[in-house]
């Protein structure tokens, strides 16, 4: 899988940009601030409809414009498809395939797969749990685009449930109507939450082996990388060889909501659900956060992204379905040995996009159009 052409209209710093790309390595070299990351961010957005830099769409639209458009020509074997995504802050985004009529944006998911690593991904190790939850959910959506609706449904119900709990607390009374409405939201939240949890647990089972292998390859096997899922639903916590089905997770989540009802009424917020979970990363017996060196932190974050690349490969073994791999300003932070090992791991990608401020930072193995 590769992009042969990328077009940006009113995106970030670009009023208009058109870029021809080739299979294999493509290297964007330029001083800091000239827009290299904007280009690769747009490729990632075309695949995931999310930015690795911001959580909202407004900064993606060029200042003074009302809409940004990303267009790409995607090749998979002998087949090619055009995908256009409209970014409309404050409104619904839309997608068009092969110049057809724009549809809901999620209809464009799955046509392009990509994995992007950037310095911001250090937050996977050092940031708060929401960063790691988003990493898992984004990978789930790439694997199964339809599950994006489950996360959207969950967030919508969670917002309504929290509003009910907060309003009841502020009013100082809990009525029968409050209880009835909360029961309705409990059912909706537990069903959507079960789908989110099930997707995450499947992804984690697929990530376990590739994460260990990627870290070993990058760090020469000094320590073993691993993880454990920390959940407010005990059934979902830990490391799963067998994954509970959605119905079982639904019942478990519903039971936890009921057991925490008094505490939630007292605090006015939802205390149980996938929105409060975390991924605990480890190197050997110790947690990564707070114990890993700077080099180990970089290697662990990079290993997570390389592992997600391997998960996408395993999900669709067709050689023509290999995701686009993007390395944004990565090599400047690595020593010579890690650069060489990363280059060897990345060389197998059908298309690789690399950015660098200094041309000499790019290993010779990744020579390509610049």
Image (cartoon, grey):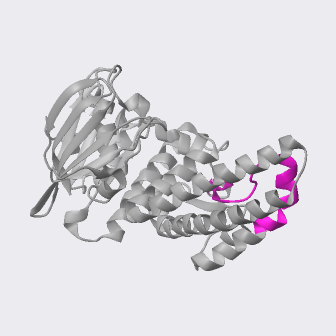
Task: Indicate the position of residue 23 as horizontal and vertical percent values.
Answer: 15, 50
Task: Indicate the position of residue 70 as horizontal and vertical percent values.
Answer: 25, 39
Query: Does residue 6 appear to the left or right of 259 in the view shown?
Result: left
Which residue of the protein is positioned furthest toward the left in this rendering? 78
- For the N terminus, the image quarter is bottom left
Task: Specify whether residue 343 is in view.
Answer: no
- For the C terminus, the image quarter is top left
Task: Indicate the position of residue 235 as horizontal and vertical percent values.
Answer: 70, 72
Query: Does residue 220 appear to the left or right of 66 in the view shown?
Result: right
Q: Is residue 229 above or below residue 289?
A: below
Task: Specify whether residue 267 is in view.
Answer: yes
Which residue of the protein is positioned furthest toward the right in this rendering? 172
Q: Is residue 370 above or below residue 258?
A: above
Q: What range is drawn magenta here?
A: 256-283
* Residue 263 is a magenta residue: yes
User: What residue is shown at x 24% (from left), y 57% (from top)?
Assistant: 348
Quadrant in the picture for residue 258: bottom right
Quadrant in the picture for residue 309: bottom left
Q: Nearer the viewer, residue 102 or 148?
A: 102
User: What residue is shown at x 76% (from left), y 54% (from top)?
Assistant: 271
Q: Nearer the viewer, residue 77 or 11?
A: 11
User: What residue is shown at x 87% (from left), y 56% (from top)?
Assistant: 175
């Amino acid at each position: 899988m590769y992009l042969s052409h990328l077009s940006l209209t009113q995106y970030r710093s670009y009023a208009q940009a058109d870029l021809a790309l080739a299979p294999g390595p493509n290297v964007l070299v330029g001083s800091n601030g000239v827009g290299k990351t904007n280009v690769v961010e747009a490729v990632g957005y075309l695949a995931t409809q999310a930015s690795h830099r911001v959580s909202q769409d407004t900064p993606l639209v060029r200042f003074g414009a009302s809409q940004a458009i990303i267009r790409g020509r995607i090749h998979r074997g002998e087949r090619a498809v055009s995908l256009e995504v409209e970014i409309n802050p404050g409104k619904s985004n839309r997608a068009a395939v092969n110049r057809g009529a724009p549809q809901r944006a999620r209809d464009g998911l799955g046509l392009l797969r990509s994995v992007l690593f950037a310095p911001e991904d250090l937050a996977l190790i050092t940031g708060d749990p929401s960063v790691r939850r988003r990493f898992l959910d984004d990978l789930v959506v790439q694997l199964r685009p339809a599950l994006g609706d489950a996360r959207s449904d969950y967030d919508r119900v969670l917002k309504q449930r929290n509003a009910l709990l907060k309003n009841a607390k502020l009013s100082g009374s809990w009525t029968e109507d409050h209880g009835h409405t909360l029961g309705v939201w409990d059912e909706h939240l537990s069903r959507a939450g079960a789908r989110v949890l099930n997707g995450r647990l499947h992804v984690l089972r697929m990530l376990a082996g590739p994460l260990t292998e990627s870290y070993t390859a990058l760090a020469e096997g000094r320590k073993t990388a691993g993880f454990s899922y920390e959940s407010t639903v005990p059934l979902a916590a830990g490391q799963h060889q067998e994954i509970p089905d959605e119905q079982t997770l639904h019942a478990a989540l519903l039971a936890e909501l009921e057991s925490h009802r008094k505490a939630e009424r007292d605090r006015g917020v939802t205390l149980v659900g996938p929105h409060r979970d975390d991924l605990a990363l480890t190197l050997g017996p110790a947690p990564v956060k707070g114990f890993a060196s700077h080099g180990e932190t970089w290697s662990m974050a990079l290993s997570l992204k390389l592992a997600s690349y391997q998960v996408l490969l395993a999900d669709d073994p067709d050689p023509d379905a290999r995701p686009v791999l993007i390395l944004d300003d990565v090599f400047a932070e690595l020593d010579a040995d890690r650069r060489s090992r990363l280059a060897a791991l990345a060389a197998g990608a059908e298309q690789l996009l690399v950015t660098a401020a200094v041309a000499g930072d790019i290993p010779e193995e990744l020579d390509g159009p610049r």
